[in-house]
Image (cartoon, rainbow, N blue to C red):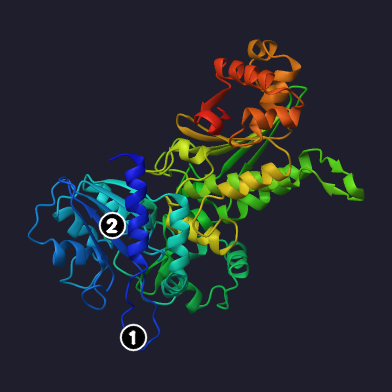
Amino acid sequence: MNQKQIRKFMEMAVDVMRRSIPEPRADGKASPKVGAVLVMPGGKVDTAYRGELRHGDHAEFTLLERKNRDQNLDGSTLFATLEPCAPQARRFPKLGCAERIVLARITQVFIGIEDPDPTVDRKGIKYLQDSGIQVHMFERDLQEAIRKENKDFIAQALERAAAVEEKPREITLSPLEKAGDRSEFDDLSEPALEEFRSAAHLADEVPSAEFRRRLTVMGIVKQDGARFLPTGFGLLLFGKEPRAAMPQAGLLATIHYPDGKEELGNFEGPQVLVPSQVLRWLRDKLPNLIDRTEARRRGADEPLFEIVREGIVNALVHRDYGIAGAKCQLSVTPDTIEVRSPGRPVEPITTEQLQSFNAPMLSRNPTLHYVFGRMELAEERGLGLRSMKRRAEAAGLPLPRYMWNDPYLVLTVYRRPESVTRTLPADVLAALNDDERAALELAARTRGLSSPKMAQLLGFDERKARRILNKLVQLKLVRRFGKGPTTRYQVL
């Protein structure tokens, strides 16, 4: 199945989703809109939507059990707009949709969005992956369409997560979901908890019974009789000394000054406080440029700091905490600010998708993402990629760059327009003349630059623009994509 066909079936699933029939309820609970498309090896395609044959029936159940129960589905591919419910998510003896998919011997599943309930999301995905099924996510624009159609359901699901008893959690995404053997509620920082309560606009007082119950539902603490014991996520987010339990917690920052001197900053307290602490430290240490254009005084570095904040939050939220020997790092040079996060992007997201600034939305650590999201430190479900791109473009800065340098996912943020050329190896820089350097800096500020556009912006004729771009391609500084009039060039 090629990418064009995959896109067609994703769009089909979204179209089918819109036909979902809400079940009649007296409690006002919104039903999710869900569509599913089944593509069988022989080419047969079938669809289903929630409530199609009976009120409340899940789309996957309708498709697999009611419409194709007698079919051999070995090797089929399923497209579902909502993450299939995991084992234990439905009341016994009902099977979760993820279990039905595995039993049907489907080999590949494309999923629109995660389950919005932070107490269960990614459990269905993890179950499928653990069962040997290839899982992919819908493209970003279709994910946004699904979320828009399910706005009421998602809002209610997030509220229910904070108001109902904790659901069974037989599938674990991380050992940090468990309570520590020797941890106590007093190991949590009350100022950090208060910061969360205030930023999330919660009415429950710290540390009232209602607030502790909310933390229990979120997976921050677990109740053991009359005691409330912090989980690993709880200690990480709000612990007074997270590194006492997790040496890999925290962020190590280093500023490399032009004269060769270095300055260190070690941020090891509650992780919810780290982004603001790091930015205060950077603002104090780094010179701030002043932009006087149009008679306005403002910090020209402010968009840079906003991009760095997004990068730090992503590093803390999405890193692989199973890599115990590495911690998040921030390195500052005169030209760049690098944020290093241990672990590859969460499967099935790739580094290439991150670099496109249009990666599908998926969280490695939903509990962390939920807390940072409630504090308005992270996008509700995304990675902040588009905001990073917009801020860089608005400030005239080169677009940030993602790359993999084992065991770190490295985000490079360029501090100035000329930084992208100043950071080149000396031999490569020597091979470029002034016009070629200007062309490279221009290409670094866009996701796709055409030769006519470059000629227009730099005052070249198109022949010279094409010659320069071809040289940059040969030097492996930019890549060419598209054909004919749609040909574009992007910095590697």
Q: Looking at the rendered structure, which numbered label has been put on residue 25?
A: 1
Q: Nearer the viewer, residue 77 or 369?
A: 77
Could you tell me how far apart the alpha carbons at marks 2 and 1 are, in whole angstroms? 30 Å
Residue type, numbered disc 1: Arg
Lower sequence index among marks 2 and 1: 1
x 18%, y 70%: residue: 94
* Few, some or many residues within 10 Å of mark 2 (<14, 14–19, 20+): some
Q: How many marks?
A: 2
x 54%, y 47%: residue: 314
Q: Element under label 1?
A: loop
Q: Is residue 83 above or below residue 5?
A: below
Q: Position of residue 131 (x, y in %)?
A: 21, 48
Q: Element under label 2?
A: loop
* In contact (CB < 8 Å): disc 2 and disc 1: no
Q: Is residue 94 above or below residue 335?
A: below
Residue 420 visible within the image: no
Of tags 2 and 1, the one toward the viewer is 1
Q: Position of residue 318 (x, y in %)?
A: 47, 47
Residue with the most extreme right position: 295
x 43%, y 58%: residue: 183
Q: Position of residue 14 (x, y in %)?
A: 37, 60
Residue 92 figure quarter: bottom left
Quadrant (top left/top right/bottom left/bottom right) for the N terminus: top left
* Few, some or many residues within 10 Å of mark 1 (<14, 14–19, 20+): few
As drawn, is 396 to the left or to the right of 342?
right
Residue 468 figure quarter: top right
Q: Looking at the rendered structure, which numbered label has been put on residue 171?
A: 2
Residue type, numbered disc 2: Ile
Residue with the most extreme left position: 70
As drawn, is 443 to the left or to the right of 434?
left
Q: Position of residue 368 (x, y in %)?
A: 48, 56
Residue with the most extreme bottom position: 26
